[in-house]
Image (cartoon, rainbow, N blue to C red):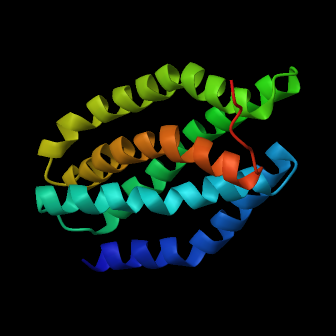
Amino acid sequence: FKDQNEALQALAKFFPLAFLMLVLVLVALFGNFREPIIILCILPLSLIGVAVGMLLTGFDFGFFPIAGWLGLLGMIIKNVIVLIDEINVQHRSGIDLYTSIVEATVSRTRPVLMAATTTIFGMVPLLFDIAFRGMAATIIFGLTFATLLTLFITPSFYAIFYKVKEKHL
């Protein structure tokens, strides 16, 4: 219990610095603030899946689930970057923004789902380990929910942030 409290204090102490560095890397990667804001808006929504997982399994939310959530954030960021980058690549190739959003979402669905599914299945054995079951439940439920959010909410946020109007065919 003492070690767990010390570890949580260390996480709390360095989390703001890590978060600031994350934001700086995202801004440098995209060269603007809109895409990083979209990513940062998706991250807290993963807590819905984590909360559902903790409630369904009855596991306590301690150090390992928090560490699992931090790892989960990295997976979510990767998935959102893959989707946003594909939107930008298609738009830069001359496709209008609305079509780019739709096409990128369709083309990146399979890779995002495959990456999430392999991670989720890889965590299943840890559900039965006394030490890591909370972390496994956090990643399994959080990633399941966050992957669905990535595929539905990210394109919506992108369209909202860039004021994209539906293309009438």
Does the rendering let one see residue 98? yes
Q: Quadrant of residue 105?
A: top right
Query: Which one is nearer the viewer's eye here, 125 or 55?
Result: 55
Q: Residue at x 12, y 43 (%)?
A: 128
x 41%, y 74%: residue: 8
Q: Which quadrant would the C terminus be assigned to in this image? A: top right
Q: Position of residue 72 (x, y in %)?
A: 44, 49
Give residue 41's position: percent from left, percent from top.
Answer: 59, 60
Q: Would you say residue 77 is visible in this rendering?
A: no
The image shows residue 147, relative to residue 12, as above or below, that is above
Residue 66: percent from the left, percent from the top? Answer: 38, 63
Image position, residue 25 (x, y; %) = 77, 52
Q: Work out whether 159 lies above or below 19.
A: above
162 or 145, which is in the foreground?
162
Q: Nearer the viewer, residue 158 or 42?
A: 158
Q: Residue at x 42, y 47 (%)?
A: 146
